[in-house]
Amino acid sequence: MIKTSSFEGDHILSVGQFQRENIDRIFAVADTMEPYAQRRRITRVLEGAILSNMFFEPSTRTRISFGSAFNLLGGEVRETTEVKASSLTKGESLYDTARVLSGYSDVICMRHPQAGSVAEFAAASRVPVINGGDGPNEHPSQALLDLYTIRREMQARGGSIDNLSIAFIGDLKYGRAAHSLSKLLGMFSNITFKLVSPKALATPLEIVDALRAAGHSVEEFDSLEAGIHNADILYVTRTQEERFPSQEEADRYRGLFRLNQEVYTQHCEPSTVIMHPLPRDSRAAAQELDDDLNSNPNLAIFRQTDNGILVRMALFALILGVADTVTAYERPVPWKSTRR
Ligand code: CP
């Protein structure tokens, strides 16, 4: 269990290790990271520290944002982006890999296709390990950035996380981001969960049972239109085809639920927030989240990705014990950002 006052030296493996006060602390530190993430200020508080980013599955957001977050705090990043580029292909064990890499690094982020593999790796590591996604199991930093986004979006609309109504849509069986976010939301009060999926891709029963046992309302739907009615947040997910036993089976479910502007206008409130952990599948056969929503101001998907930098900076600062000394290591900004 993570200590209330300090995260120093801890692994981040599962949202189950957090309590609400831990989440409040992460979010408070994330708020302080905004000027650095926006390049208005520069800090070198992690100068000399090395992150090893070990991604044994494809990733755009998680890998680059963990690396950018570490760089923005002044640290350096080393990366492996494929199993075949590592000595795992020569039969090296996770134990040996962890023993070796933790001699080279101060913190390690890891993504791996097998559930439980990152925890196994962490058990052998001499430095903190962050789970960047282990198979269909968990994606804790994604859930934290999603929750941080929900808090911001709801506050902007006069609401809060407590008493939220959220519709999870799509592949809820294999979607690790949905699993972690559901568990994290379960720590709050009076959440209405609307789980919209084909029956074969329903949320695992143990997650549903735990949410109900914690006093939340859980409703399951196999119709998109019925499930999104009266929701404050829509959390759309893609079919995780890489987790299916066969491509034929994945093809059966692709494109079943498609949220577009017309569906949104007919069935959602004008303020309903649209989220997606991304990547969205923009191929013609899928399009679970249509491009025609790109100009909808309630589409929060790119606010989510921006928030990911803040939350990941906060995790590094807390784990490496510098959350309260970031400003002491500021440098003048010698260049002008041209980002629009
Ligand atoms: N959301 C997410 O994990 O994206 P990537 O697979 O691109 O890292």
Image (spheres, grey):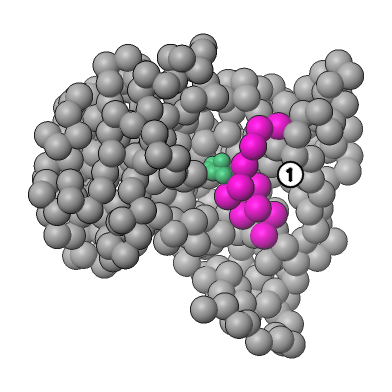
Q: Quadrant of ligand 1?
A: top right
Res. 311 visible in picture: no
Q: Residue at x 27, y 16 (%)?
A: 199
Q: Magenta segment, principal secondary structure?
A: helix
- Residue 18, percent from left and from top: 47, 39
Mark 1: C-beta under 8 Å from nearest atom of ligand 1? no
Which stretch appears magenta? 56-68
SS category of the residue bearing label 1: strand
Is 168 in the magenta? no
Q: Nearer the viewer, residue 246 or 176?
A: 246
Q: Residue at x 53, y 51 (%)?
A: 5
Q: Quadrant of residue 304?
A: bottom left
Looking at this view, name the residue that lies furthest to the front. Answer: 284
Q: How many marks?
A: 1
Binning the other alpha carbons within 10 Å of mark 1 as few (below 14), some (14 to 19) or many (20 upward) gives many
Asked if residue 155 is positioned above or below residue 173 in the image, the reply reads: below
- Residue 154, percent from left and from top: 26, 59
The residue singled out by tag 1 in the image is 53
Looking at this view, name the residue that lies furthest to the top. Answer: 245
Left or right: 317, with 103 as reference point:
left
Q: Residue at x 89, y 19 (%)?
A: 90
Q: Residue at x 35, y 23 (%)?
A: 253
- Residue 37, percent from left and from top: 58, 70
- Residue 73, percent from left and from top: 69, 65
Asked if residue 22 is positioned above or below residue 140 in the image, the reply reads: below
Left or right: 322, with 184 as reference point:
right
Res. 74 visible in picture: yes
Q: Quadrant of residue 101?
A: top right
Please state which amino acid type lies under the numbered disc 1.
Answer: Asn
